[in-house]
């Protein structure tokens, strides 16, 4: 691939045929709708600090702490979001003030701590209550799921003919599996019908941003998780595409982000005016998905979207206000043909003569450091700005034991998934990046995480990994890559379902009550 990933971000291919004449859609959509006066912004540390007096810290399907970022995040608050132990989370009573003088309580729920007495008491008390409000019915269903997940570590293994997660690749395989099964049994998502392609209900499926289009299309045709009755929905999907907004709304080289901001804000004002659900939760049970570099910035076009809602982002950078306990990190997957044909598979370790490999454009703060120390300087560490003529990028990955995945302009890189596909152990080199599905996957068990400061020691770090340990990591890569595969139609435990599960977990973390 070389530095084609840079060009790929400017050559975004479409999956829809009716795009060019619809670039004025947002103006048509929102004409006649006045801007709503937004109330005070919600607390920055949204899910980290909110709780009630008797509720435990937030749910994490992981070890006592999230996997740390390779290097300290640029801000103390961002670093705290990545590595703060669960047991240290605040349980301070707090509420969120929204517009129209309405307040909701958002109560993080703990699923990692198990107590039969507390679990049964909470369930019985909830069952005694008379369920009258629609939101109470939804929360009652979610509470049953929380109880089931809490009991997972004590239950006998579940008989699942398709797949039973096991191994050190998972922080807690039993909890993850039970949570996944509960998601399949209960989770319902309402997709807002408002909006027209290409800005809404559409996205690229043959580019570096392919996850936007693939997720949108899977949700559009899904019959299992999608519901047409919003009163039965546990979460609400805002089907916008930042990639398409950049293409049709943003004026190239104008440096004016205003049109994108207005499009996002007007769309949320539209659905909040037509439906009661956004206002009921101040957006806390709503989510967006974006793989574009500007996804985080676009999400803050509306203050409650950025602060309250679940944001599924490829650009999961803690220095850019990504909150691991509220937001979802998704993989960046470059599907040039729209399918996985020819991408998955590789030889055994015995026929991988190269220790480590990287080739790509020089952009961002990390790659220049990598090239400075290793470009054409070591036969074991093959680092190239441009691949030698006649050399195949996929073949180089399949011939390497480790694949270097330094961040570029943004922290995410398609090389991570490309490495997993080819059976090459990924080496993550970045700062402030939260790897995909980190609440479930223990990345240090099947990848190497190197700080930018340790780039000069790269060969020492990799050669210190024993052959036995490398073989374990290699086998774990082969087992875990099913969670990153794109299938059409989607298959259980693949990337589409892993994204849904991450959103499901964040929804379980919040209890919504109007007060």
Image: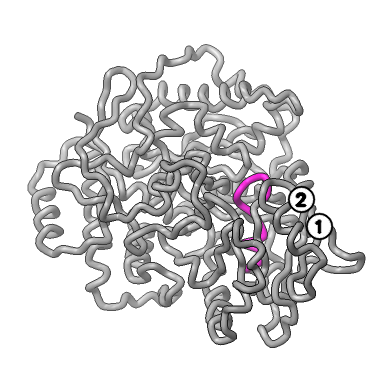
- The disc at residue 362 is 2
For label 2, the SS is loop
The residue lying at 13 percent from left, 48 percent from top is: 126
The reply to whether the magenta stretch includes residue 412 is yes
The residue lying toward the viewer, choosing from 69 and 288, is 69
Q: Which mark is residue 238?
A: none
Q: Is residue 492 visible?
A: no
Q: Which residues are magenta?
A: 408-420
Q: Is residue 167 above or below residue 121?
A: below
**Secondary element at tag 1:** loop
Residue 278, image x, y percentages: 37, 30
Asked if the stretch drawn in magenta spans residue 196, the answer is: no
Task: Please identify the residue farthest to the right as the structure is shown.
Answer: 389
Image spot of residue 466 (x, y percent):
57, 83
Residue that badge 1 annotates: 385
387 to the left or right of 340: right
Q: Are marks 2 and 1 in contact (CB under 8 Å)?
A: yes
Q: Nearer the viewer, residue 351 or 273?
A: 351
Figure colour scheme: one colour
Q: Quadrant of residue 60?
A: bottom left
Residue 106: x and y, percent?
A: 27, 38
């Amino acid at each position: 691939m070389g530095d084609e990933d840079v060009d790929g971000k400017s050559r975004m291919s479409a999956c829809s045929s009716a795009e060019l004449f619809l670039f004025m859609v947002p103006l048509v959509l929102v004409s006649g709708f006045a801007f709503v006066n937004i109330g005070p912004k919600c607390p920055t540390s949204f899910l980290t600090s909110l709780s009630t007096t008797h509720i435990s810290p937030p749910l994490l399907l992981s070890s006592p702490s999230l996997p740390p970022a390779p290097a300290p995040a640029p801000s103390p608050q961002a670093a705290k979001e990545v590595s703060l132990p669960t047991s240290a989370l605040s349980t301070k009573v707090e509420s969120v003030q929204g517009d129209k003088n309405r307040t909701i309580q958002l109560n993080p729920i703990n699923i990692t701590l198990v107590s039969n007495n507390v679990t049964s008491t909470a369930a019985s008390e909830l069952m005694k209550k008379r369920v009258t409000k629609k939101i109470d019915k939804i929360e009652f269903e979610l509470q049953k799921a929380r109880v089931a997940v809490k009991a997972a570590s004590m239950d006998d293994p579940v008989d699942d003919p398709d797949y039973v997660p096991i191994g050190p690749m998972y922080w807690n395989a039993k909890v993850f599996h039970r949570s996944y099964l509960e998601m399949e049994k209960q989770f319902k998502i309402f997709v807002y019908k408002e909006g027209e392609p290409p800005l809404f209900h559409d996205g690229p499926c043959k580019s570096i941003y392919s996850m936007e289009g693939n997720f949108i299309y899977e949700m559009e045709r899904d019959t299992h998780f999608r519901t047409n009755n919003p009163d039965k929905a546990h979460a609400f999907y805002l089907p916008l595409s930042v990639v398409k907004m950049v293409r049709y709304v943003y004026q190239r080289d104008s440096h004016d982000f205003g049109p994108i901001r207005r499009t996002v804000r007007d769309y949320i004002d539209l659905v909040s005016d037509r439906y009661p659900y956004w206002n009921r939760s101040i957006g806390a049970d709503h989510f967006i998905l974006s793989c574009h570099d500007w996804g985080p910035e676009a999400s803050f076009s509306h203050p409650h979207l950025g602060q309250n809602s679940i944001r599924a982002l490829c650009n999961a950078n803690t220095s850019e206000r990504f909150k691991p306990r509220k937001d979802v990190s998704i993989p960046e997957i470059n599907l040039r043909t729209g399918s996985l044909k020819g991408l998955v598979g590789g030889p055994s370790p015995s026929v991988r003569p190269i220790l480590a490999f990287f080739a790509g454009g020089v952009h961002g703060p990390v790659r220049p450091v990598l090239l400075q120390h290793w470009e054409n300087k070591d036969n074991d560490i093959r680092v190239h700005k441009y691949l030698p003529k006649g050399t195949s990028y996929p073949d180089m990955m399949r011939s390497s034991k480790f694949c270097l995945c330094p961040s570029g302009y943004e922290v995410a890189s398609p090389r991570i998934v490309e490495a997993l596909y080819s059976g090459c152990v990924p080496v993550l080199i970045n700062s402030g990046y939260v790897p995909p599905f980190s609440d479930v996957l223990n990345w240090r068990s099947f990848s190497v995480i190197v700080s930018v400061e340790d780039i000069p020691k790269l060969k020492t770090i990799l050669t210190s990994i024993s052959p036995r340990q490398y073989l374990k990591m290699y086998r774990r890569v082969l087992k875990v890559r099913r969670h990153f595969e794109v299938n059409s139609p989607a298959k259980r435990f693949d990337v589409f379902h892993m994204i849904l599960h991450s959103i499901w977990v964040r929804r379980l973390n919040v209890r919504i009550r109007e007060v």
